[in-house]
Image (cartoon, grey):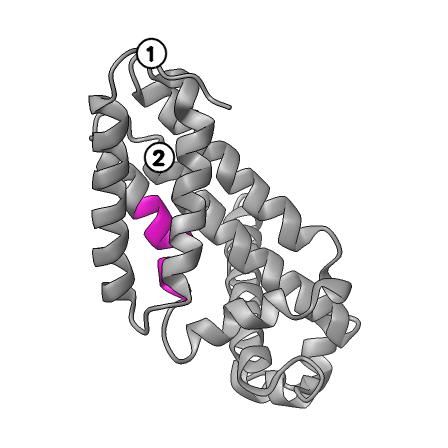
Amino acid sequence: MSSAGPAILRQDENDAGRREHVLDAALLTFARYGYRKASMEDVARAADISRPGLYLYFASKQDLFRAAVTHALDTDIAAAERLLAETDRPLRDRLIEAFDQWTGRYIGPMTKDVAILIENNPDLLGPIPIEYPRRFAKMVTDALTAGMSADRAGAASDVARTLLSTANGIKHEVSTREEFLARLTIATDLLLLAVIAAPGPLVGH
């Protein structure tokens, strides 16, 4: 009995790793071909798994699509949350890195297609495209509130919305993640400087 426990644990870990690999391959496959043109056979080939094996994980293409998008967004949210929670580091650095994880990594020939894929299929994803951005916005607002002085914290929501709008605008204007990061850094520095240097207490609208 004592040897069965670790063996089962390793099997569970392997299965979880295999499922994540399938989800990553599925997302890229859907991005490459589009949801409607991509087939379960395409995903199985990309994930190096048999088609019957793929159906053991997911009953339908729609189930697989939702799971792949949710997995990607869960990964992004968790990474951004970890970065914003590192309160021993400057707020400015944490914000820039969180936005880079949330938005910057979806810039480029292939990863940009992933963002477009998510935006173009709201009917298949239900509340997912609304729920996750809302969660990220709250995380940014909370980080700003905690990281700003008491007389400035009232503007945290406005600053967060401005950063979100700016990052989204930059995303559509650049072609590389590096360019996104450079421009976002400038925008973040200017915005935080404006908030810090503004005379008198700031109150969010």
User: What numbered label is drawn on residue 95?
Assistant: none
* Bounds of the magenta segment: 97-106
Main SS, magenta residues = helix
**Residue 160 % position (x, y):** 42, 35
Q: Secondary structure at mark 2?
A: helix
Q: Residues within 10 Å of mark 1 (few under 14, many from 20)?
A: some
Q: Is residue 89 left or right of residue 49?
A: left
Across and down, in percent, residue 81 comes to 42, 38
Q: Is residue 159 left or right of residue 51?
A: left
Q: CA distance from mark 2 to mark 1?
A: 24 Å
Vertical arrangement, residue 191 with respect to residue 25, above or below: above
Amino acid type, label 2: Leu
Q: Nearer the viewer, residue 93 or 148?
A: 148
Say whether residue 163 is visible.
yes
Q: Residue 59: percent from the left, percent from the top?
A: 79, 71
Residue 191 sits inside the magenta stretch = no
Name the foreground residue: 56 vs 35.
35
Q: Residue at point 37% right, 27% down?
A: 144
Disc 1: which residue: 201
Helix, strand or loop for disc 1: loop
Residue at 75% in and 66% down: 124
Q: Quadrant of residue 56?
A: bottom right
Residue toward you, 130 or 173:
173
Which residue reaches farthest front? 199
Would residue 13 appear left or right of 180 to someone viewing this image? right
Residue 156 position in % (x across, y down): 41, 25
> Disc number at residue 84?
2
Q: What residue is drawn where x is 53% and y is 84%?
A: 32
Q: Quadrant of residue 190?
A: top left
For the residues carrying marks 2 and 1, which lies nearer the camera in this image? 1
